[in-house]
Image (cartoon, helix red, strand yellow):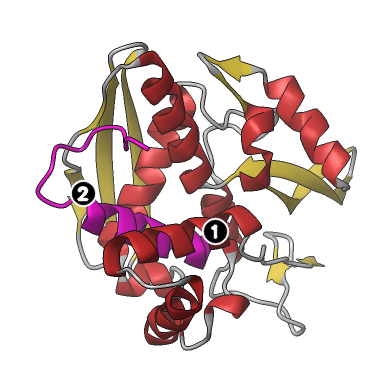
């Protein structure tokens, strides 16, 4: 799909308060999805918004309206050797309270789920709660964020060429979305805010961060990896302060 197709999807999603999905179209990713049409499964492009895009929308909307957006501490629903399931409450002075529930698979999940189960589940739950408020609620996507769908496609059962295998044994291709330009710019901005220096120094520092976390440089980062680092940097930035909308 072209950028104009993405913008068309964003326009269909409409406005939320003072912001539009079109303003945050760079956070929308087209991912391959399987849909059953008649007796056959067909691959189609389905739009999803990344969690950091939903956060950016929500923060901007509340900043413009001068209202609070608060994130409650995650509540553990299930925590055993197989999974961690968290519930996160998001409260808006404008739209009221919404809940999001998400699970990290400790045994058969992605590397991020196995190594950082709390962070993955918390980020996903926040994304679902924000979608319930209308942020990133795209046609056909439901409450899922782009990261959720990327994880869902990264199972331990794979076909011979690395594609996923459906319940009937049919193999289909899987695509990993790359980091967006918006995410790259946000990472640089957050790094400079925290550590100072010029953009070149920020890029060098971010390469070290990604090397440590994912064994590759930032240039090779996926959307999900970039979203995870952004969430960690925002958490570090707001540590010790009330979890409210970020003021720009």
For marks 2 and 1, give the CA distance: 19 Å
Q: Considering only vertical position in the picture, is 237 above or below 81?
A: above
In the picture, measured across the screen, residue 72 lies left or right of residue 9, that is left
Q: Comparing marks 2 and 1, which lies closer to the viewer?
A: 1
Q: Residue at x 23, y 68 (%)?
A: 81
User: What stretch of residues is rendered in magenta?
Assistant: 224-248
- Residue that numbered label 1 is attached to: 185
**Residue most toward the left?**
240
- Residue that numbered label 2 is attached to: 238
Question: Is residue 66 within the magenta segment?
Answer: no
**Residue 47, position as x, y percentages in the image:** 71, 42
**Residue 70, position as x, y percentages in the image:** 24, 29
Q: Residue 10 is drawn in which quadrant?
A: top right
Label 1, secondary structure: give it: helix
Quadrant where the C terminus sits is top left
* Residue closer to the observer: 115 or 195: 195
Q: Considering only vertical position in the picture, is 139 above or below 108?
A: above
Mark 2 or 1, nearer chain start:
1
Q: Residue at x 58, y 28 (%)?
A: 137
């Amino acid at each position: 799909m072209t950028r104009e197709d993405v913008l068309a999807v964003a326009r269909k999603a409409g406005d939320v308060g003072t912001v539009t999905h079109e303003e945050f179209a760079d956070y929308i990713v087209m991912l391959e999805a399987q849909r059953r049409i008649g007796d056959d499964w067909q691959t189609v492009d389905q739009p999803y918004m990344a969690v950091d895009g939903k956060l950016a929308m929500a923060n901007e909307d509340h900043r413009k309206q001068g209202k609070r957006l608060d994130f409650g501490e995650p509540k553990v629903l299930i925590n055993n050797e197989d999974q961690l399931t968290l519930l996160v409450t998001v409260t808006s002075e404008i739209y009221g309270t919404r809940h999001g529930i998400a699970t990290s698979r400790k045994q058969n999940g992605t590397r991020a789920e196995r190594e950082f189960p709390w962070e993955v589940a918390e980020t996903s739950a926040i994304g679902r709660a924000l979608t319930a408020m209308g942020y990133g609620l795209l046609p056909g996507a439901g409450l899922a964020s782009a990261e959720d769908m990327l994880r869902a496609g990264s199972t331990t059962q794979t076909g011979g060429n690395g594609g996923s295998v459906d319940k009937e044994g049919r193999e289909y291709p899987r695509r990993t979305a790359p980091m967006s330009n918006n995410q790259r710019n946000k990472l640089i901005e957050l790094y400079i805010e925290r550590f100072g220096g010029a953009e070149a120094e920020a890029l060098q520092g971010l390469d070290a961060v990604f090397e440590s976390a994912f064994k590759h440089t930032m240039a090779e980062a996926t959307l999900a990896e970039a979203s995870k680092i952004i969430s960690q940097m925002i958490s570090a930035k707001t540590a010790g302060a009330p979890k409210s909308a970020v003021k720009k």
